[in-house]
Amino acid sequence: MPIQVVMDSTGDSRHFFDANDTREVAKAEQRFRELRNVGFTAAVRTGSNQVSQIRSFDPTAEETLFFPRLVGG
């Protein structure tokens, strides 16, 4: 079952969805767009300990990670 993992200052939240359920896929795609619009970087695992940045929603990705924008001082 695909998962979206959202990293933030409180830790992470995990959102599982059924790739065969059109409503759940639509909700996951909406979450993807909302997070990208507020500055999160999205990435998928491509191999052992490797990730690749993505810019569009992929409902077939087993795990999508969202990292917040870094703020420097």
Image (spheres, rainbow, N blue to C red):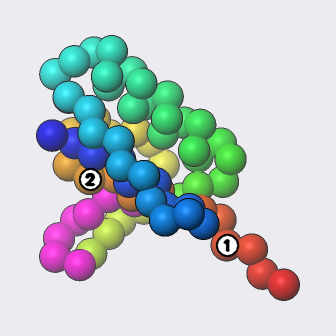
Q: Is residue 61 visible?
A: no
| Cα gap from disc 1 to disc 2, whole angstroms | 22 Å
Q: Quadrant of the N terminus?
A: top left
Secondary structure beneath dot 1 equals: loop
Is residue 32 a member of the stretch shown in magenta?
Answer: no
- For disc 2, the neighbor class at 10 Å (few under 14, some 14 to 19, many from 20) is many
Q: Main secondary structure of the magenta part?
A: strand
Q: Quadrant of the C terminus?
A: bottom right
Residue 39 lies, in percent from the top left, at 66, 54
What residue appears at the point 32 percent right and 25 percent down from the top-left corner? Answer: 25
**Highlighted magenta segment, given as a residue range:** 43-49
Which residue is under mark 1? 70
Height in image: 26 above or below 11?
Answer: above
The one of 17 and 59 positioned closer to us in this rendering: 17
The one of 10 and 41 positioned closer to us in this rendering: 10
What residue appears at the point 20 percent right and 28 percent down from the top-left corner? Answer: 18
Q: Earlier in the sequence, mark 1 or mark 2?
A: 2
Secondary structure beneath dot 2 equals: strand
Dividing the picture into quadrants, the one containing residue 69 is: bottom right
Residue 63 lies, in percent from the top left, at 26, 53
The amino acid type of the residue labelled 2 equals Glu
Is 13 on the left-hand or right-hand side of 39? left
Disc 1 to disc 2: CB gap under 8 Å = no
What residue appears at the point 48 percent right and 39 percent down from the top-left corner? Answer: 32
Is residue 46 a member of the stretch shown in magenta?
Answer: yes
Height in image: 3 above or below 65?
Answer: above
Q: Is residue 49 visible?
A: yes
Dividing the picture into quadrants, the one containing residue 49 is: bottom left
What residue appears at the point 42 percent right and 24 percent down from the top-left corner? Answer: 27
The amino acid type of the residue labelled 1 equals Leu
Which residue is under mark 2? 63
